[in-house]
Image: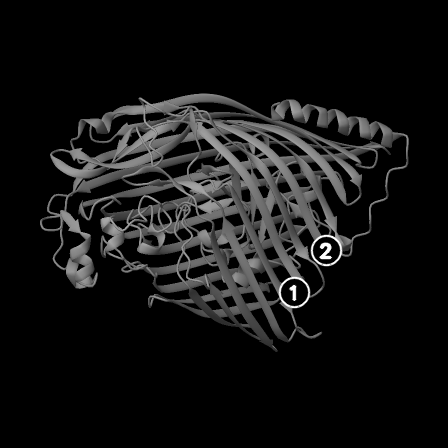
Amino acid sequence: MTLTSALRPSFVLLLGAAGVAFGQTAATPAKPEETVTLRPFEVTAEASKGYRVTTASTATRTNTALIDIPQAVEIITREFWNDIGAASFDESFRYAANVYVRNRHAGSGDGVNLRGFETNGSISVDGVRMGNYKRDLVGYERLEIVKGPPSAVQGRAGGTGLLNYILKKPDAARRGGFVRGSVKWDEFDGRMTRGELDANYPLTRDGAVTARVAASIQKGEDYIKFNEFENYTAYPSVRWQIGRNTELIVASEFLNLTTPSRDEGHGFAIYPETARRLIPRFDTPTDPITALRLPYNFNLIGPDNVDKQRIAASTLFFTHQFTDNIFFRQVGNVRFLGQDSFTYAAENNLVINMPSQYSGFETTTQGSTAQGDLVAKFAPVDWLSTQTLVGYSYGDVDSVNSNYAGIPDAPFNFLNIATIGAGGNSRSFYNGRRVSNLARSSYTRTDSYSIGMYVQQDIGLWNDRLLLTGGLRSDRDRVETTNLVTNLRTAGGDTTLNSYRYGATFKITPRLAAYAVQSVQNDATRTIQRYNGLLAGDPRANEFFTVSPYTELQEGGLKGEILGGRMSFSAAYWQMTRTGSVVNILAPGISQGQTVNIGTQSELQGAQSKGWELTAFGSITDRLSLIANYTRMTTSQAFTGQQNAQGWNTTTNRPATVPLRFAPDWNANVFAKYSFRDAQEQGFEVKAGVSAIGPFYAQVTGLGLTYVPHRQTSLDAGVSYRWRKILVDLMVTNLGNDPMLVTRDQPPRTYNLSVSTTF
């Protein structure tokens, strides 16, 4: 039985149950402990209490109670980020269910595995797509993660999920802020210092105009040798309450970031000994690289691998309430991104003498976004309520990109791991390394725009005992790529796409609901370069192929609240299918007479994930807060490639399907904190958490799809003390110094000591 056929009876059951309820008195909703009045588009007014929030905007475009949303949505709060010392994009996902970061430092700040699928182009801010770039958490209030295609409500995005960051905004009821200084160090003498500021003040006596600025400065180095940081960020914003029903907010982001351009594991593709022991193929006394006993901080490729990003973005939010029932929001965003990223690479986990390559790119991107939403709410009779959302979105992007590739001069055209290790893996070893011929392998300009229109209809029956929702979105996406060397058009497309979603929620009791949903997202056809890492002049650089991404989600489950509403929980079963996903496989090859590592991109055929997920978050008592989740999952895709670690090949026992890469069979997360503080919130607080994953298939450079059979765990613990306005916090991550080899190997034991004060 397919999940589609399984869900259809669920809808019938919900409708039937509603029919029974129609003849009865609908249950009276329990009176919440705290009543918070929110406008349909406002999501920052509700503060987190014990990691619990009750509403989200990402899955519906309007601020909606989590229990009423017929789709899995996970929320990571500012309170939790503070407790674990999170500051960067990758840290914002810690303890999320079935979510793994693909790019810890590198790339554009996207690349997240969600329910087995890697999602790109999936970031929005306050429900608006504003481009993918690196982010600093000092500027954000929380993160909302939609599991599965956002389709009708959010449109173009990574089809398997959406990551919606909520910006910090001015609050007329607050005056003051905090400053925080922190130092982070690890087992390998990596040290990072960081300063943060968050200040909020009314600018007028009546509080009509309020300003806020969040900012950070960070300098230091990673635990991996030669990985250095120098980051400066500022997030200023102004709120103007023009009238009783009209509001204007302008929020900006300014970032100047210098970070490593590559990372360990799948970035360098040279695993240290502790990580190699997790892979059966490498966990042998005869493996030459394992025998070298590479330390955890080993960096074969040396210094000067740098990614520099300069980001300037500004967003205007205009909100107006026409009547008690009609609301409007207009958003406008303009942005600029300049990025220079250059990398030395040597990627083969099978040999100790590896060809080295230097490659990189320079990109300038400017874009704009406009989006308007109109919401009308009516209750024509006692047993019927309706909400209608109509809207549009427009976005354009203009980018110029230059790619470069070259071979370092001898003797650095080949790197010998044993020689580098014997020399102490020092910076001096690489003195004098240069690339005499760093040719530009491509020079292109891409212009694109998209126009979308959408409608969503929600119906509440019998005092909202039964909630029905449906939405439809139509988008036109147009893109054109020009070779700036020849001034010839090399790729392009003009596509009209339709996505839809429908679902139902039935309140079994005021605090327990059953739901079911189907969501379909059709993304624009993409033209993709088949090979990367090639040297200038290689004819394969002109080989392209096209994919037409399509995602379908079917999901059903329960959502509810327990312990007097202090804890929220959900239980979901899903099945998701995806076409048009692309995987990049690295392998040594010859380009223009030189040995290099060539990436080959291919489409994953028939990709699917299905499983169930349990989550709980909130406060068990006034002193004990908890986040807990558990996921079981199976994945599959059509077999690609010649061979993997199980010996599958194209001529003998080739399987029809193999699992998706980086998709563990199961994962579990638990994080709790307990407060010993007094009525004045002074005193100690302790906290601890554990993450664990089960077996999975990794994509190992030089080896292919490889089974990792081991359970992996990571333990964190910390303590904080508040005295008057001073807060001292110590958080230790990965107490056991354990590798967590999934999409990225995790850092070793790391200490984060911070001191903050409010004003």
- Quarter of the picture containing the C terminus is bottom right
Residue at horizontal 52%, vertical 61%?
84
Q: Identify whether 331 is placed above or below 35.
A: above
- Quarter of the picture containing the N terminus is top right
Q: Nearer the viewer, residue 389 or 513?
A: 513
> For the view shown, which residue lies furthest in the right direction?
24
Q: Where on the picture, by quarter, is residue 351?
A: top left
Left or right of 147 in this view: 592: left
Residue at horizontal 17%, vertical 61%?
422
Q: How does the figure colour the protein chain or chains?
A: one colour
Residue 690 in percent (x, y) is at 53, 57
Residue 279 in percent (x, y) is at 36, 46
Q: Where on the picture, by quarter, is residue 317?
A: top right
Amino acid tagged 2? Arg
Q: Identify whether 22 is placed above or below 628.
A: above
Q: Secondary structure at mark 2?
A: loop
Q: Mark 1 highlights which residue?
A: 205
> For the view shown, which residue lies furthest in the bottom direction?
723
> For the view shown, which residue lies furthest in the front direction?
285
Label 1 neighbourhood size at 10 Å, few (<14), some (14-19), many (20+)? few
Q: Is residue 759 visible?
A: no
Mark 1 against mark 2, which lies toward the viewer?
A: 2
Give the label on residue 566, or none: 2
Left or right of 283 in this view: 415: left
Amino acid tagged 1? Arg
Q: Earlier in the sequence, mark 1 or mark 2?
A: 1
Give the label on residue 628, or none: none
Q: Nearer the viewer, residue 289 or 482?
A: 289
Q: Identify whether 491 is placed above or below 138.
A: above
Residue 361 in percent (x, y) is at 26, 43
